[in-house]
Image (tube, rainbow, N blue to C red):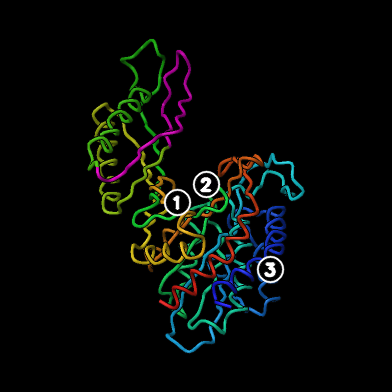
Amino acid sequence: MSLKNRIRTLAENVYEETVAQRRYLHAHPELSFYEAETAAWVKSRLDALGIEALTGVGGNGLVAVIRGQKPGPDKTIALRADMDALPIAEENDVPYKSTCPGVMHACGHDAHTSSLLGTARILKEVSSEFSGEVKLIFQPAEEKLPGGASLMIRDGALRNPDVSAIFGQHVQPYMPCGKIGVWPGMYMASADEIYMRVIGKGGHAAHPAQFIDPVMMMAQILVTLQQVVSRSDPRIPSILSFGRISAEGATNVIPEYVLVEGTFRTMNESWRMEAHEKIRRIVHSVAEGLGGRVELDIRKGYPVLHNDEALTSRARESIADYVGEENIIDMDIWMASEDFAYYTHETPGCFYRLGTRNEARGIVHGLHTPRFDIDEESLRLSTGLMAWLAVKELEG
């Protein structure tokens, strides 16, 4: 039996277990930076496989290595899964519904973690047929700054042994079950948070000469800030949006200050830093010109996620070999962000999508929503495909 067919068979063999593990995780979600029980449970599953895991990496993260027994190059490929859940109250009526009020696996991290456990079992079974090492990264806190990926990198997750490439798999509820999405180059945006306190001088609305209106100042700032994107290089995707404004005044009361919160996203790191400076200059100059001032805080979030072109090209060939060319979807760029991006700034990375949609069964709801769920048939594919990608890249 060929290695590919053996991996396919093993993926079928671990399917029921993978589903059961996904359901356990779904019923027991934990928020970012609080995944202690999840981490302990993952370690117990790895222990049962005879795979030693290093714990406490980047907080609640785990790192384990499966060594190939076949003579050949001593190369290391990493596979990453995230473990945290979201502060969302689940509305699904399913046997594995969240047992933690207000907390839910609404982004598929339960599927990612259970899949990587299934992949670990497969790789352990076929370790005599590949050389090098596969590093398993079970990561905490993808959903919250500063991002568990950055903390795991800080704690050496990509070192000892050094990783030459990393793969990440993420569910995609807008893509049918059985399909795999790939895209080379820039794929997901950086995401920075903007907080402004626009300060004027409050007073009675009937006496405009006696106050400095922070509401009008805020309006002028927001209108002027749109030039940061509208007059930037049109070849670089960028978004500047403000989603929260709080002015505690009244019909006849001008407040002392206005609070504004927004986001800046782009696909180019150099332009990202340049845009930050433009935002600062515009905000302060407009406020000063109108007699007020602004306390501005730009919090750097996740960087641009770049899929290494050469690695992604090889991965696409391996995916086509495993699922068939007709089941590959060429994705487009997406202005959402992901902390997997940090890994791609350290080593060649490939972040691909696993289709989980099934309209016939009503599994159609988007990520980060109370009705999100996956077609668990996708777990027949997720474990074997990730194992196949790892061994093919080790061969390459």
Nearer to us in this view, 259 or 261? 261
Q: Is residue 23 shown above or below 203? A: below
Residue at the top extreme, as displayed: 206
Residue at the bottom extreme, as displayed: 71
Residue type at mark 3 is: Asn
Lower sequence index among marks 1 and 3: 3
Q: Quadrant of residue 232?
A: top left
Lower sequence index among marks 2 and 3: 3
Residue type at mark 1 is: Ile
Residue contact between numbered discs 2 and 1, judged by CB atoms under 8 Å: yes
Nearer to us in this view, 322 or 98? 322
Q: Residues within 10 Å of mark 2 (few under 14, many from 20)?
A: some
Residue 167 x %, y %? 47, 65
Residue 257 belongs to magenta span: yes
CA gap, disc 2 to disc 1? 9 Å
Q: Which mark is residue 13?
A: 3
Q: Secondary structure at mark 1?
A: strand
Q: Secondary structure at mark 2?
A: strand
Q: Quadrant of residue 290?
A: top left
Residue at 27% x, 38% y is 228
Q: Residues within 10 Å of mark 1 (few under 14, many from 20)?
A: some
Q: Which mark is residue 175?
A: 2
Residue at 38% x, 52% y is 187
CA gap, disc 2 to disc 3? 25 Å
Q: Is residue 33 left or right of residue 271?
A: right
The quadrant of the rendering that contains the C terminus is bottom left
Residue contact between numbered discs 2 and 3, judged by CB atoms under 8 Å: no
Residue type at mark 2 is: Met
| Residue hosting label 1 | 329
Residue 86 x %, y %? 60, 48
Highlighted range, magenta: 235-261
